[in-house]
Amino acid sequence: MRILVVEDEPGLRRQVSRALSEAGFSVDEAPDGEEGEFLGDTEPYDAVVLDLGLPKVDGITVLKHWRAAGRDMPVLILTARDGWNEKVAGFDAGADDYLTKPFHVEELLARVRALIRRSAGHASPILECGPVSLDTRAGKVTIDGASVTLTAHELKVLSYFMHHQDRVVSQTELIEHIYDQDFDRDSNTIEVFIARLRKKLAPDLIKTHRGRGYSMSASGEGA
Amino acid sequence: MLFAPLFRRSVSLRLILLSTAWIILALAAGGVFLAQHFRAHVENSFDDELSRHVEELLSYTDVVDGQVQLIKQPVDPVYLRPLSGWYWEMFVDGRLLDRSRSLWDEVLPPALQKPRRGETLGYFQDGPRDDRLRVVAATYTLPGYDGEVTIVFTGPAEVIQSATEEFSETLVMSLVLLGLGLIVAVVLQVILGLRPLNLLRKRLAEVHEGRTDRLTGHYPSEVEALVADLNELLEHNAQVIERARTHAGNLAHALKTPLAVLSNEADRMEGDVAKTVSEQIVIMNEQVKRHLARARAAGGLGAPGAKADIGDIASGLKRTLHRIYQHKPQKSGDGVGVSIALVNVQGQFVAGDRQDVEEMLGNLMDNACKWAATRTRISAERKGKDIVISVDDDGSGVPEDRRAEVLARGKRLDEATPGSGLGLNIVHELAELYQGSLVLDRSDLGGLSVRLTLPAAL
């Protein structure tokens, strides 16, 4: 899962990015509205953490531009401005959630996870696919109740499939949502991760669709 | 002076009273002057007529053999009617030569003053029957006679008197009518002339009541400058408030971001220091929130003419709260979300700043959604000069003996539900700034009913 953090205060930006990375997200950072808007326009993010008081272009304007251009990724506004008029303006501009500073990192993580989950159509924080279950809050994976240990990258790949079950996910899509923009991307590593997941969980859990990508579904049929 | 307080209070009354006094004085003086002038004029005319008669009689006089003789008597019948008041007498060297038939057997009382030779006198004197007479007497010398001839003609003074009185009556009546007309004109003039001021007063009242935020309408040039100044002042006020708000917002931003950084660092650390820092950050944040809310609100009072549309504000908050609480599990059943019903909020206006009202209503509605099992209701009702906004929920409510606590600073009954606990307290303080009130009660929906009373705008 790939997240964009747009925040002008370097200290807070670092903290938020670090916390999100530690929680298993790939994070891109933008220090101002202009760069933030460009990244949001060009990269496929699963969620955005957006400050309102940004240099160059303010957060509300950035959000309005994204929504007008049809960019519908979930956006969490993170701001010091806690007036109701500002909250109403934020939600009316297309925000999905609103968190005021100061905040606890756990609160932010919980909200980001919930946003990603809901935008993929899942109500419960525990995602299930056949025998496999993923607790998005703790990043714990079990198969038939037995705990499985995964590396950070394996977890990222599995998490993406768990969020987007019953549809074909191309390799490019997978790469875009798993690595941040500075990562040296290599499509071969994806194949390695998928092979390891099949080995650790179940051989027929992830199906390969030649030339199209992969799919994961409880029935094993795929899309 | 009895009028002194009233006088000082009303410009209209001052103008009307002064004008009325001046009108009465001027008309009275004018009346006296006219009456006197008229009387003099009537006397002169009367004297002229008598003088003609004197000259007529003189022409009938002749000197025959050194003796003065009257050849003919005046033919005017008034001098024949007995005791008519129209008399004449003719003296030669002080001796009565002849007199009018109208005198009958009377003589005119001796004249008070005798005209000298060649002189004509006009005066009043008593007649033979105690009536007043107007007298014209003249003394002549005749050719061929050494002595002097004095001719006296009289007419009843009553003629002059009645003519003068008749005129005076008409005069007084005309002057009274004229005076009344002038006073009416003054009153009209004052009312019409001061109308821009009255209009200004009315518009100012409207601004004060929150119906409009600036003075509108056309005013004459004398008042226009004042109106422009007032509008400038109102605008300046609004700008000052806006600036204060921006400052407050900037301060919030400036303080809260470092607080967030500190708080997150403290969260990552362990031990007593981290705990103390975390606790102090919470206190600092509550202080910042509380004082910023008040700083923003206190500005709202300085802006007369502000009005807030409850319908508009409630709709916006409803949209937002729907989003915030759309995933909240309902306490009964397994549905999610909270329903928000708006009742009779359209077209209701509070005399106050929009942001302040939005802040109050937002906190109340947020609280209601937070505590509600499945539904909340926001209703507004106009009560006299106030608007009562009720925010109800179907949650567990607050027991009567703990309601005062909820309004106290930073108090939260249920520590488990997120929120700083400042919500109701801030609303309470804001409501008091607006001379309103906040009352907690049991709701017909089952939970808490919060009634916020604020001054209405129309």
Image (tube, rainbow, N blue to C red):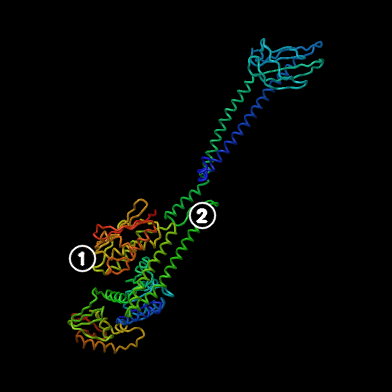
Q: Position of residue B84 (x, y in %)?
A: 63, 15
Q: Position of residue A192 (x, y in %)?
A: 26, 89
Quadrant of res A223? bottom left
Nearest the viewer among B119 and B286 is: B286
Q: Is disc 2 placed on a helix, strand or loop?
A: helix
Nearest the viewer among A57 and B92 is: B92
Amino acid at the residue labelled 1: Ser
Disc 1 packing (10 Å; few <14; some 14–19; many ≥20): few
Residue at 37% x, 80% y: name it: A14
Residue B349 in view, yes or no: no
Residue situated furthest left in the rendering = A144
Q: Position of residue A209 (x, y in %)?
A: 24, 85
Q: Chain of mark 2?
A: B
The residue carrying mark 2 is B227
Nearer-N-terminus badge (2/1): 2
CB-based contact (under 8 Å), mark 2 and mark 1: no
The residue carrying mark 1 is B332
Disc 2 packing (10 Å; few <14; some 14–19; many ≥20): many
Amino acid at the residue labelled 2: Val
Q: Determine whether, in the image, residue A204 is placed left or right of residue A24.
A: left
Q: Is disc 1 placed on a helix, strand or loop?
A: loop
Q: Determine whether, in the image, residue B17 is placed left or right of residue A49.
A: right
